[in-house]
Amino acid sequence: METIAEQIQWLVFFNDQLLIERNKEVCNLPWGEKPPVEPEMNATIHSITTPKGVLCKVFSIDREIGETEQYFMTGLRSSYDYLPFSQYQIAGKAHEILHWDKNSNFCPACGTPTEKREPIMKKCPNCGNELYPAISTAILALVRKGDSLLLVHARNFRGPFNSLVAGFLETGETLEECVAREVMEETGLKVNNITYFGNQAWPYPSGLMVGFIADYVSGEIKLQEEELSAAAFYTRNNLPQLPGKMSLARKMIDWWIDRK
């Protein structure tokens, strides 16, 4: 009988489109000894292992695969709606590795072509510079004011929903300092009592979202108009459209809604 160590899950990407296998009403990553589609001659096949010890092979192709009865392709974000959560997580990791591999072919210090030395490490043969997958850290801030919650609409949102204040960590600051700065910069509000909520890998293309709860102290909403198109405090019975269930922002909002 074939052991789990000998079986392979295949993650095949065309840009951010992921190949998914359909068996009746059940969707999974393709599984087997051979890839579901043949990689190109010059394709790099990466190996990663899940926390449960399942071997995964990852590669990208230069064409989209048309939908069949067995296979279809969908965006990495929307794969959340089809795959078991553990498979969605490994798909995110795979996509981050492909993004790193594509964008680390040359040394940023001297311009020399890099050489892959480890699964997630490349080295410059000229100056010795080592390149690992970079992760961009961003905060989410759930700001409470009495029985209301601060929600904003950022100009880069892909829909009409409202979400939490967010922003990237800058050099030389703590995560809590980042929360206070981003809320002040984007909305003109001062907050305190900043406490950690949770975090989430965000492979779009290579981020980590870190959520915090904060309390309103003072100020009137004044939009950073190049970032936000709207911001307001909402009560539980007067909420706008919210982000999708896959996001940490939505988990934080739902936590706030459920609290008495």
Image: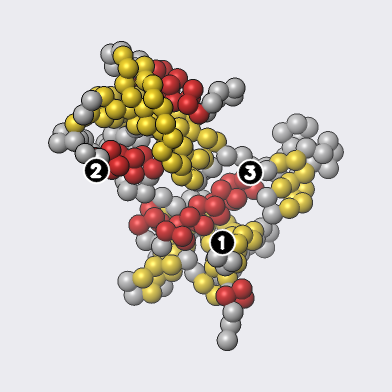
Tell me, yes or no, if residue 69 can be seen here: no
Who is closer to the viewer here, 72 or 221?
221
Quarter occupied by the N terminus:
bottom right
Q: Which mark is residue 5?
A: none
Residue 58 screen position, x and y as percent: 59, 60
- Element type where label 1 sits in the image: loop
Tell me, yes or no, if residue 149 can be seen here: yes
Q: Amino acid at mark 2?
A: Asp
Q: Amino acid at mark 3?
A: Pro
118, above or below 249, in the image:
below
Who is closer to the viewer here, 235 or 67?
235
Q: Nearer the viewer, mark 3 or mark 2?
A: 2
The residue positioned farthest toward the bottom in the image shown: 1
Tag 3 residue? 133
**Residue at (36%, 16%) from the top-left corner?**
190
Q: Nearer the viewer, mark 1 or mark 2?
A: 2
In three-dimensional space, the C-alpha distance between marks 3 and 2, rounded to whole angstroms, equals 37 Å
Tag 1 residue? 50
Q: Is residue 71 left or right of residue 106?
A: left
| Dot placed on the residue nearer the N-terminal end, 3 or 1 | 1
Tag 2 residue? 258
